[in-house]
Amino acid sequence: MYQELPVEESVDHAVSGHAGADLLRGRHVTDSRTVGGNVGGRAGGSWGRAASIAAGVLVWCALVLPGQPLPPPVTALVRVPVEGLVVLGLLLVLRRRPARLLSLVAGVALGLVVVLGLVDAGVRHVLDRPLHLVTDVPLLGNGVDYVRDTWGRSMALLVQVAAVLLVALVITVTVSCLLRIERLVRHHRWATAQVLAALAPIWLVAAALDADVGSDRPVAARSAIGMVDDQVALGRQDLRDNRDYAAQLAPSAASSPAREQLLTHLRGQDVVLAFVESYGRSAVEDPGLAPATTAVLDQGTRRLAAAGFGARSGFLTSPTVGGGSWLAHSTLLSGTWVNSQPRYDQLFASTHSTLVRDFGRAGWRTAAFLPGNRLDWPEGSFYGYDEIYGAGTLGYRGPRFGWSLIPDQYALSALHARELAAPHRAPVLTEIELTSSHKPWWPLPRLVDWRAVGDGSGLTAVSTDRATGTDPAGARERYARAIQYSLSTLISFLATYGTDHTVLIVLGDHQPLPEITGGGASRDVPITIMAKDRAVLDRISPWGWTPGLRPHPDAPVWPMDGFRDRFLTAFGAGTR
């Protein structure tokens, strides 16, 4: 009985029939369905073969490289991706239409995995941690803000458009590659079966033996699936962490000591809490960064000693690295470990007290100087500041210095003029964020006489070009110079405006980018307390901190969230 064949099978049957007849007549047949889909031309066939090879290589790379560092090691390619074996096997047994649908879906999925892998590699490079997809998505806005504030709105728009186009291009390429591979499999089923027969046992044996080609690079690869699994696991971990942190905050809302016990041994002192952007331990210990920085600190120790100031220095471990300064600030001021954006959001939704509120309850006026903040800052009310000075309220009329809109010297000059020099006032606690050491560390402001600061219009840069280049060594040099400027400015500020009742606390918020510190660097940042009143320094003598502005390598290292309680204990009632 005659049975109608599906159209695609009828065409295949007809083509094969004609081909068989032509072969019997001794004629050469060129099948238009050959790799690349070109008929007859040698150039077309060559291009088709090249395109097919490129498609295979790109898909292979997309399957084995997710989760690898940038740039990826060559050994990462010497692996067998199980996802590729599964897709090849399905393409081998599926009919044409389901196979093409599978290729389309797999291509889109693979493109998204490639994008996810690129973002993960970028996060690891900048923040030295894996991507947390759900919680890190809101941080994309911070990245756009950084580009806009550093290079302008046009560049920020260009970056956003480029990012969208890159995602579209990646997905388009992966879909095209999978569709081409589907055609290859359809027309070379026997060759495909042989490839699978060779690679599948290799994957199985390698998985059984746990064979690898380097750290975290098993031969039996499942990188694409593993990346998705990792994000699911991290999402669950974040949910558990949110519950745990909420439990920590609940009983601590009223954990601050009674007013009469707060800071009794610090009464009458003006306290300046200065965060220096990216001032990390590497700045004082890395052989390539430290010499000039430690020279500034040692010279500053002598200069301040001549002016009657003493200093003690140690280390704190920051909850972040490379960025996320707000996490470090909230960790120090709240006395809780704020190492993620969800924790940050939870903290500000709570009634937890802060070091700023402690000072306010004890009778200090509290103010924040945020020269890098161009927008409203609702978090300020949570911290408990009486006054908040942002970039738009500091009256700066000078040039921009890279990302840092306002140089450190002007910010400190404004702090003195608006708070410390005010007559007939209560003691003041001021937090100031110094941003001149924020990436890209160029151009660098020039330190001038404090009387010449004015409205900032006369301030100039040390250099207006990138004389040190854009290579890693040049970036390290720019970073070191920026840190030296910030520290020199603080030392000069205290020597110029400091009084018998001034206490200056200087610390870094986090280490700089891993490209500056290299692999394996700690998350420690230096912290120094300076004062003329020896009783202030005597209160912290049990801490074992190093005399002077430069902490000894063996100086104590505390987690940053432990500082608030230790500080309140040292200067509270009931202590010696």
Image: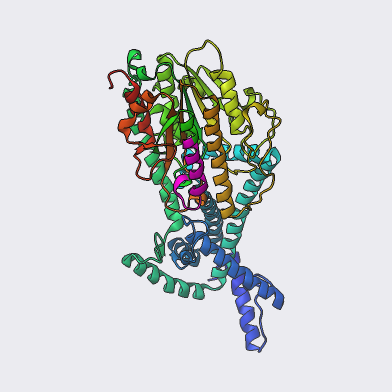
Position of residue 564 in the picture relative to residue 165 (left or right): left
Q: Is residue 458 magenta?
A: no
Residue 212 in which image quadrant: bottom left
Q: Position of residue 265 (x, y in %)?
A: 36, 19
Residue at image point 67% right, 25% down: 454
Residue toward you, 82 or 379: 379
Q: Main secondary structure of the magenta part?
A: helix
Q: Is residue 560 left or right of residue 517?
A: left
Residue 409's image quarter?
A: top right
Q: Residue furthest bottom?
A: 26
**Left or right of 280 on screen, residue 28:** right
Colouring mode (rainbow / by chain / secondary structure / one colour): rainbow
Above or below, comparing residue 441 to residue 307 in the picture: below
- Is the residue 353 above or below the residue 303 in the image? above
Is-magenta flag for residue 288? yes
In the rendered view of the protein, which quadrant contains the C terminus?
Answer: top left
Q: Position of residue 113 (x, y in %)?
A: 51, 52
Of residue 91 and residue 524, the one placed in the foreground of this image is: 524
Q: Is residue 181 visible?
A: no
Question: Is residue 575 found left or right of 271 in the rendered image?
Answer: left
Question: Residue at image x 49%, y 67%?
Answer: 92
Q: Is residue 478 above or below residue 542?
A: below
Viewer-proximal residue among 236 and 74: 74
User: Residue drawn 55% across and 12% down?
Assistant: 423
- 19 and 229: which one is in front? 229
What's the magenta region? Answer: 284-302
* Residue 100 in view, yes or no: yes
